[in-house]
Image: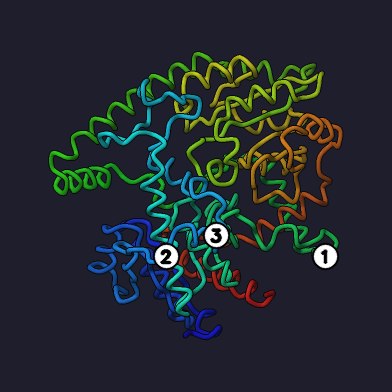
Amino acid sequence: MADQTEIRRRFIVPVMSETVVPFLDSLCRELADRGYETVFVPQSRAAAAAGEYQSEFSINYNSGIVNHSPERDLDFLVEKYDIPSARALVFPQMNYDYPHSDPPSLDAWDHEARYLPPQTGRKPGNFQPYIDWLHRCLDFFDQVFESGNGGMPLQYQGGEVIRRVLQRVAQHHDIPAVWIGFSPLEGHSGFYINEGSDWLTLGNTSYDSLTDKEIAQARSYLEDFRTEKPIVRADRSDQKPSFFQRMANRIRYLRETGRDALPRMKHRAKQRFRRALLSQYAERSYCSVNESQNIISHQEMDYVFYPLQYYIESRVTMRAPAFYEQSWLVEYLSRSVPTNHKLVTKDHPQQLGAQPRRAVDTIARYSIPLAPSYHTHEVIENASAVVTLNNTVGYEALLYGKPVITLGKAFYDDYTYKVDDINDIDRTIKYAVNSGGPSEEKIIEFVHGLISGSRAGVWRDDSPESIHNLVEGIVETAEAQWESS
């Protein structure tokens, strides 16, 4: 059995694909120099093979999960690890893989939903393969931790089954976790303590406790933000693989699968074609840039702003699952804003065509849908309030001093009006609008928390500087939790 000291010096890292292995090698090397052990658990045979044949730390790979046969019943395991519904837990990964119907299309199979998986006979809503995977992951990690060989989960943000199971098993054994993910600071990563993106540095520091230097640093960042109006987006080094990388991956896939690849290739081509058509349809249904400009600059119109979110992301499927189908929410919001206000929406420019046609129709009917390319900052600055699930637009609105209403789990929850009962949203919006938004001191406090909880460097960037900074954040976040436990 391992004692607490050994567990405190050991990280367990899920390996999601073979492409991340070189980065993890660099991370492991730096952690080892600081006296930490790293154990890698691959979620697929491909990732396991890459760890065995490509990693210099192949001995650190525990690939038993790939062929693991559960010894305990699923009912026992979900009860032990406080999982109320297996289907709810696996839902995010089902959406990543697309074996689920489009939100507004319950009859998607009959009408060929855009994202049907290409496998013959694999219909949307078939939870069983994912529940089987959940069962294997739970039983595997249960044995690891019960035998005393557990450790601190270290992983990138995401809603895959293996990530969520590792979090729950470690939490059951009172072992803290470190999650690396989005930070609104460009070129930086945020450090969370759970899958809900909670930061240790947010909500735990008051403005009065800040030094003059910390206040000046936060104020400088805030002034730059309001002047330069940067577009906040996820910053990952692997976000857009090069043309040659994509071609190499396709060639390798063809060699490995042969004729079996043809249905998938046909499916992807069909998917791209449908998305292009839906993009055109959405552009015709939404306001033009000029129309959007006229609407926003119209001084006599008061409005509440709701930015649409990409429903496949874990921000929705894991941290706001009740609002997976957002078109109904737009209709509900349209009759929940104050009497003298309009509801303004805006689709994400990079996700244009992701919303099904029926959803686009509903959005256009019950809100003023601005052009996706229209600058979000302009919409925020003129809004009376912003309603969001947990979008980065909520973070931006706070920096402009706007009242923000959140429906899902957001990293900035401590500074918003959180809706616990959707039936009270009309009252919450009215209260928020009348509040005038957070004070400048609260905003400075919030910005300080973001700065102190972020580190330069991004996941998969294995440059020495990035690795060094990430490890600094990992160790600090882990040790702070151990000290407070």
Q: Where 184 falls versus 371 (above or below)?
A: below
Asked if the residues shown at circle 1 and circle 3 are in contact, with their CB atoms under 8 angstroms apart, the answer is no
Q: Which residue is mark 1?
A: 209
Q: Which mark is residue 72?
A: 2
Q: Where 9 falls versus 86 (above or below)?
A: below
Q: CA distance from mark 2 to mark 3?
A: 12 Å
Q: Nearer the viewer, residue 451 or 411?
A: 411
Amino acid bearing label 3: Glu
Measured as percent of width and height from the top left, residue 236 is found at 45, 51
Q: Nearer the viewer, residue 470 or 306?
A: 306
What's the residue at 43%, 18% (across, down)?
280
Measured as percent of width and height from the top left, residue 456 is found at 54, 60
Measured as percent of width and height from the top left, residue 419 is found at 73, 40
* Mark 2 / mark 3, whichever is N-terminal: 2
Dot 3: element: helix
Dot 1: element: helix
Q: Where 49 falls versus 417 (above or below)?
A: below
Asked if the residues shown at circle 2 and circle 3 are in contact, with their CB atoms under 8 angstroms apart, the answer is no
Amino acid bearing label 2: Arg
- Residue 458 in sight here: no
- Residue 417 in sight here: yes
Q: Which residue is mark 3?
A: 79
* Mark 1 / mark 3, whichever is N-terminal: 3
